[in-house]
Amino acid sequence: MATPYFSKRNLQFLLHEVFRAEELTQYEYFSAHDRETFNLALDSATSIADTLMHPYLKEIDKNQPELRNGQVTVHPKVRDYLKAMGDAGLIGAGFSFEHGGQQLPELISSSIGFILMAANNGMMYTGLTSGAAHLITSFGSPELQAAYVPNMLAGTWQGTMALTEPQAGSSLSDVSTTAYPQPDGSYKIKGQKVFISAGDHDATDNIIHLMLARIEGAPRGTKGISLFVVPKYRLDGTDNDVTSTGIYHKMGQHGVPAMHLTMGERDDCIGYLVGEPHHGLPYMFQMMNEARIGVGMTAAAIATAAYHAALQYARERPQSRRLNEKSQLDSPQTPIINHPDVRRMLLFQKAVTEGSLSLLLEAARLYDISQVAEGDEKENAFLLLDLLMPMAKSYPSEMGVQSVSQSVQTFGGYGYTEDFPVEQLYRDIRITPIYEGTTGIQAQDLLGRKMTMKGGKAPQLLFAEISKTIAEAGTFDDLKPYADQLTAELKRTQDVMMALMPHAQQGNIERYLSDATLFLDLMGIVVVAWQWLKQAVVAKQALLTQNPQGDELAFYEGKIHTMKFFFHYEVPKTLGLAVRLKDTEVLTIVSEKELAL
Amino acid sequence: MKILVCVTSVPDTTTKITFTDNNTKFNKAGVQFITGPYDDYALARAVELKEKLGGTVTVLNVGEADTEPVIRKCLAIGADDAIRVNADPTDAFFVAEQIAAIAKENKYDLILMGRESIDYNGGQVHGIVGELLGMPSISPVMQLDIDGDTARIVREIEGGKESLEAKLPLVLGCQEPIAEWKIPNMRGIMTARTKPLKVVEPTSKDTLTNVSGYELPAPRGNVKMIPADQVETLIQLLRTEAKVI
Ligand SMILES: Cc1cc2nc3c(=O)[nH]c(=O)nc-3n(C[C@H](O)[C@H](O)[C@H](O)COP(=O)(O)OP(=O)(O)OC[C@H]3O[C@@H](n4cnc5c(N)ncnc54)[C@H](O)[C@@H]3O)c2cc1C
Ligand SMILES: Cc1cc2nc3c(=O)[nH]c(=O)nc-3n(C[C@H](O)[C@H](O)[C@H](O)COP(=O)(O)OP(=O)(O)OC[C@H]3O[C@@H](n4cnc5c(N)ncnc54)[C@H](O)[C@@H]3O)c2cc1C
């Protein structure tokens, strides 16, 4: 039997028992759905993942795309996969009926992304297409929509996000690709883009770039950037002068080419403005939360696949005897899962991966509510989501890297070989803390903007939400100590904020943000602790009311056990972080004196 | 062309099977149910035939309300409507009686089933239904084409294949490669919600058989390592212990 790459039971638990997916159908926008439409959509994705993705995990890693004579060739299965996704209607399932979708909530769409990426994250194509198409349906003219979106959702055209340039990575305001207005209302595009995922390949008939560029003469900085549709081939089939000038050979995610593109080498690259001039960055930012949930999901998915591989291996690999039976050399070796150190590694992986997935589904649900609710409910969901996003992107990716490292460790020497998938997954996951805003940028977003926006309303809302879970947990004797511990953690983050705020008030932003990443780490632990407590409350209720037996009993008890693990092994790390964050010694800010590094 | 497809709702193949009530009842808690894989082939072919020749595909299941997710999936794949006979499918004869009763009322041109269920693997229901309806019943069918009122069939027989022709109506037990499994698309999933699902009561509630107990096979033994140069030993063990040659 093939190694499972995710737990269906856990996904069902989170979707239906913890986040009560079906409650979303009470909103008019989602009312055509019910539990079965959700489950069937997940089922269809799983079928595609099982048959067209997972079997090619290694093959795709071994056969990197190549750029030859200006053509990029990818694994032939990518085309089959894209066609299956298009036929299944899964690329645009979350789009409105009007735009050819089925109004599937992000809660379910992002779970589908999770399944697909756990099966084979090297086939990271469809998320890019739906993100690009969503920009067109949200801000583009009806003509642009009609011309591009249907083929994109059908999986026959690829969409990309073409933002990064050599001098404009984290700093998108420095984008310099230029758009020259033409008499017919279109633009001629000139410039270069780097690292464009799926930026060129032969698995679709066209590539549609959603590209940031500056209209000639536009103001400097963020206010002068516009968004364009720049196709590889124009609608009449002619070449649009987008040249693949390079392909990056990457550490992981070998299935997807990352391209260096040059526009306008022959001065004949046409782009079509999306929405208003100079609104490119705000448009992108409105899509940012979705994209970041996507990257967080990819990280959680890769770490989940690695965890399940490690778990299976640990059950099967006999090595050594238990510590109390060391002298009994005649007794058979025990499976390594029985060694406390191995069990600790496995619990760490379970705690990180299932905690990450829970946090991401929380974010996805808030995204849905922020889209379809009204009044205060909408506004609050939006603020909460905005605040949670840096953690929901960075915790799964940063901790996912560590989790997969522990998956490799669980395999011992075999984990370092190509005989098992974990070495690949370790390489694959490493990109997730980098793209879609590095961890450093996420941290500044959290501490520099989100903690303080609207007079600090977002953290107030978050603490109120967490307090609800604490109150529920407090009603069960065995969960109460953890509820109390989480209350203390909230207090700790407030103390840290109090210590940092004066720097901001004095206008010393560099000092205020110098350890922002450590603050992000701290907040990440706190919100994942919240997610674990939330899961434990649901598990506890199930244990008390459903009288589960066998695997079901083990499932719910395992949830409570892992919550305890998280609180006893991970939550105490906040102590060290808080000590440093409140420390007055400054060591990382550049000073006059030149110090050797 | 009016086609009836009979489907089972069976535990996913990876399920760990446990029993309750003193080993007399299968424990359904936490079990993922799926459409019987052979039934899925039958359904896929039925939908293809409908697309080619026109007509309707009705899905039938004998089972309690918890089989409805499986029925819904069949509707999402392309069946037009569904009937659920509201009863515990206690044995093959009982199930066949229910199917026959529905078939008598509705006059189908084709009754497609899986070659066997994957929970009890009886491989009997199609035979009994054919008998009860006085129709030919053929299994396991690997290829099926319809030409007017004639079915051209290829079925697997010991060591080879047999090509047959038969006049409709027919009862067929299907297997791969009659068609490829279909993955429901989002549009199908959404329309399935509003397709008719009729629940009818069984014609009789007689229990013909009673389960007095279930027993799991002994757990599989450990791996035996045989040095590469001892092929004789390996062959011996394959014969005497594994009993596969
Ligand atoms: C495999 C892959 C796929 C990609 N796919 C795409 C894609 O599809 N589309 C696209 O547009 N881009 C894509 N990118 C680009 C990616 O988004 C950028 O690499 C990323 O945003 C970082 O930019 P950079 O590489 O220029 O690094 P830099 O911005 O140079 O960052 C280098 C380091 O400096 C830190 N840093 C930078 N600025 C600050 C600051 N102000 N404060 C503190 N620290 C700072 C960063 O955190 C980082 O650690 C991809 C990259 C890769 C590797
Ligand atoms: C809750 C439950 C309780 C059961 N209790 C008993 C029991 O007490 N004793 C016992 O012997 N068996 C029991 N069964 C098994 C059940 O009787 C068989 O699955 C069914 O009778 C088919 O028998 P079979 O394996 O011979 O099917 P097969 O003859 O192998 O099935 C061939 C084909 O017949 C069709 N078919 C079979 N069953 C159904 C159905 N229910 N509805 C629609 N089409 C069908 C399908 O197309 C299938 O592929 C139980 C099953 C369930 C789910």
Image (tube, grey):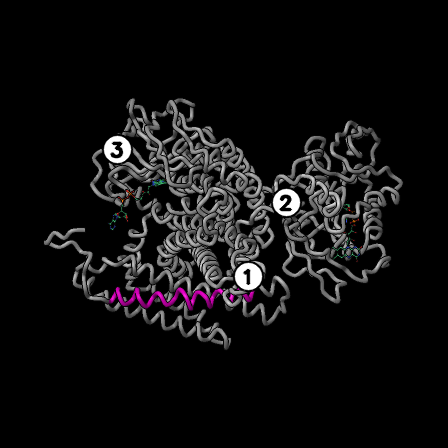
Question: What residue is shown with label 2?
Answer: B226
Q: Is residue A499 shown left or right of residue B116?
A: left
How would you rate the neighbour count of disc 2 (Cα within 10 Å): few for under 14, some for 14-19, many for 20 or more? few
Magenta region includes residue A578: yes
Tell me the kind of residue under disc 3: Thr
Q: Choose between B16 and A502: the one closer to the eye.
A: B16
Q: Which residue is mark 3?
A: A178
Residue A366, visible in the rendered structure: no
Cβ(mark 2) to ligand 2 < 8 Å? no
Most prominent secondary structure in the magenta stretch? helix
Q: Chain of mark 3?
A: A
Is disc 3 placed on a helix, strand or loop?
strand
Q: Amino acid at mark 2?
A: Ile
Q: With respect to residue A155, does A107 lie above or below?
A: below
Return the chain for callout 2. B
| Nearer the camera: disc 2 or disc 3 | 2
Instruction: Specify the amino acid type for callout 1.
Output: Leu
Magenta segment includes A387: no
Q: Nearer the viewer, mark 3 or mark 1?
A: 1
**Residue A75, percent from left and from top:** 48, 32
* Residue A119 at least partly seen: yes
Q: Residues within 10 Å of mark 1 (few under 14, many from 20)?
A: few
Label 1: state its secondary structure.
loop
A338 displayed left or right of B216: left
Residue B55 coordinates in the image, percent (x, y)? 73, 36
Instruction: Tell me if residue A343 comes above or below residue A106 in the rendering.
Output: below
Instruction: Identify the secondary structure beneath mark 2.
Output: loop
What segment is highlighted magenta in the picture? A556-582
- Structural distance between the alpha carbons of marks 3 and 1: 73 Å
